Image (spheres, helix red, strand yellow):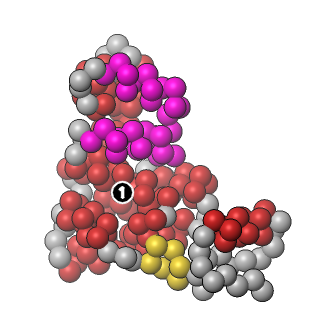
Amino acid sequence: MILFRRRDELTEQVITELHNAHLPTSGIDRIFLKENLAVMDLLSVAKFVLNMGDNLNLASLLKSPIIRISEHDLYDIATSRGSKSIWDYIVLSCNNHELCKELYDRLSIFINLYYHSNASNFFQNIVDVLGYRDILNQECGSDSNDAIDELLYASNKFVSQNNSSLQDFVFWIEDSDTSICQC
């Protein structure tokens, strides 16, 4: 048994090496929901549909496993857009730029989903109907599945106790310290 006094870089390295050696380990006791990479990527989708002009968030989403464009392609888009937002550049260029057409089509799915969903089924549709759960688990690790489930649970609970606003849910989840125990 290995016990750590605090969670730091050494802790992460030891757990990674234990996993690589196929030794059974329970990982870190707690996962903070808003620090989980898969949850951060899903929240990035929500933030995109809420504010398409946020270049930093959209760039993060484009680089995430959900969209997965190369650093080179992102650089080309970012430097070609002039004073336009990245989203505006994608929209204006989708007729004559193959990558922008593909990005427009993929991002529009999330926008349409937002217009026809509440905070609860927005995330449910992304992870289970559109199949992004498998992609995120493959890229971010199987530990992400628990965090994704907790995000879905939190969004269902939020909608039942508060309202169905995706914006309110994103604000609430980023303001909370929701964590899950991996016992």
List x then y, in percent, for residue 65: 51, 46
* Number of numbered tags placed on the structure image: 1
Position of 128 with respect to 8 (left or right) is: left
Quadrant for the N terminus in the image: bottom right
Residue at point 83%, 66% (across, down) = 21
Residue at image mark 1: 43
Q: Quadrant of residue 101?
A: top left
176 or 68: which is nearer to us?
Answer: 176
148 or 44: which is nearer to us?
Answer: 44
Residue at point 29%, 70% (across, down) = 175
178 or 155: which is nearer to us?
Answer: 178
Position of 153 with respect to 69 (left or right) is: left
Quadrant for the C terminus in the image: bottom right
Q: Residues within 10 Å of mark 1 (few under 14, many from 20)?
A: many
> Tag 1: residue type?
Leu
Specify the principal SS of the magenta part: helix
List x then y, in percent, for residue 15: 71, 70
Tell me, yes or no, if residue 111 can be seen here.
no
Q: Does 73 appear above or below 179?
A: above
Q: Which residues are magenta?
A: 54-81
Residue at point 46%, 73% (across, down) = 32
List x then y, in percent, for residue 105: 35, 32
List x then y, in percent, for residue 123: 35, 60
Any magenta on residue 150? no
Q: Does 157 appear above or below 56?
A: below
Residue at point 49%, 64% (across, down) = 36
Q: Does 48 appear above or below 168?
A: above
Q: Secondary structure at mark 1?
A: helix
Tell me, yes or no, if residue 58 can be seen here.
yes
